[in-house]
Image (cartoon, helix red, strand yellow):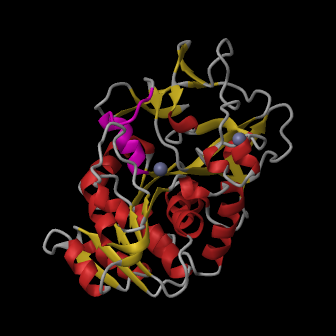
Amino acid sequence: MKAAICRQMPGSLEVEDIQIDNPGPGEVLIRTVAAGVCRSDLHLLDGHLPVELPSAAGHESAGVVEAVGEGVSYVKPGDNVVTCLSVFCGHCDNCLTGHAYACMTDEFARQPGQPPRLSQNGKEIYQFAGVASFAEQLLVGQNALVRVDPDIPLDKAALLGCGVTTGLGAVFNSAEVKPGSTVVVVGAGGVGLSTIQGARIAGAGRIIAVDVEDHKLALASELGATDTINASTTDPVGEVIELTQGGVDFGFEVIGLPKTVRQMFDMVRPGGTATVVGVMPFDAKLEMSGLDFLSSKVYQSSLMGGGSFRVEIPKYVDFYQHGNLKLDEMVTQSLPLKDINKAFESLKKGEVARSLITFE
Ligand SMILES: [Zn+2]
Ligand SMILES: [Zn+2]
C-alpha cells in the first residue's frame, strides 16, 4: 500500500510502497477514506517533535474497518470509524477519572520483538502519533478509534480525529466556557476555527478572533466570531483589552508560538483562564514573571480536547448533523495522496483552514 513517509527532518514527505501487517490481538485494520493535514504533521517535518524516523505521517483520519484481530468486539468489518492519537487503556488512574486524553500506559503499541505494524523490505516504518493517516490503510489498536454514525460523510468526520475535537474540547472540558462570557482565540487555522465554534456553541457572548490573514478572519466571522483583529496591522493585546474593558474571561492560543502565547496571557483579565492549545516546538521557552502570578489567572494547557474522545466525538457528530458544528466550511481543499506536499505548502503560507487528503 502507499503511504507518505518522512525520512529526514527538516524535510518533506515521499509517497512510497510499504507493507502493513495483519491485525494482531486487539488491533483493527482500516481502509482510509480521508485524512486531515494538521499543524502537528508540519511540526514533524520541521523537526520540532521528538520522533523516530522513518515515520509514516498523518494522524487525523476516518475510514472503514476492513478486518479485526483476536479479541476485538467494539467494531466489525464495514463499520465507519474515526481514529484518534489519544489511545486509552481504560484502567489507569487517568482513564478511570475521566482524563483518558492523558492515559498513562502505552500498552497498545506493539512490544519489542513483535513484527512492526508498518515496514518496508523488513525494516520498520514508525507510525507518527501511533496512527500514520497519510496511507491507504491504517493498523491501530481498537482503543485508538471510535465508531461513528454511517450517515456522516467520512471526509468531514476525519476532521474530528484531531483538530475539531482539540478545539471544541478545549472550550468545553479544559476551560469550561460559560454562557455570556468573553473569549479571545489567537490563531484562526483549523483548530482555532474549531475553538471559535466551540465558544459559539457554549454560548459565549463576545468571541474575538485574532489572526494575520484577512481571509481566515472572514471565515472566523462566518463560524461564530463577533469581532476580528488582524494582528499584522493592529496591536492585538491593546485592542482586546480595549474591546473588553480590561481583558477577556477566557483566552485560547491555538498556533503554538511563545510570542502569541505571551500575547494571549496578557489579553486575559485578572481571574480569567488562559488555555494554551497550540503545540509549541518541544524545546521552545516561554517567559513569565512574578507579576503574572499576582493576578490570579489560571494558566493551563489543553491536550486533545481534555476529554475522552470516544465520548466526545459522537456528540460532535450530532452537533454537525443538527447544523451547530460547521465542518464543510472548514475544508479548503481536497487533494490525492500524491499531492501531499502541496497541502503542506498551503499550510505554511496560511492559505487554508484545513486540507484533506482523500483516498476515493
Ligand atoms: Zn493534529
Ligand atoms: Zn489509561
* Image position, residue 139 (x, y; %): 65, 34
Residue 327 left/right relative to 105: left
Give the image quarter of residue 224.
bottom left
Residue 44 is left or right of residue 17, and the answer is: left
Q: Position of residue 258 (x, y in %)?
A: 28, 52
Where is 75 relative to 46, above or below? below
* Magenta stretch in the rendered image: 38-51
Percent across and percent down for residue 65 are: 72, 45
Give coordinates of residue 13: x percent, y percent: 36, 34
Quarter of the image with the N terminus is top right
The residue at 62%/38% (across/down) is 138
Residue 97 in the image: above or below residue 41: below
The question of residue 25 being in magenta is answered with no
Q: In what quadrant does ligand 2 lie?
A: top right
Side of 166 where 256 appears, left or right? left
Q: Residue at x 57, y 63 (%)?
A: 169
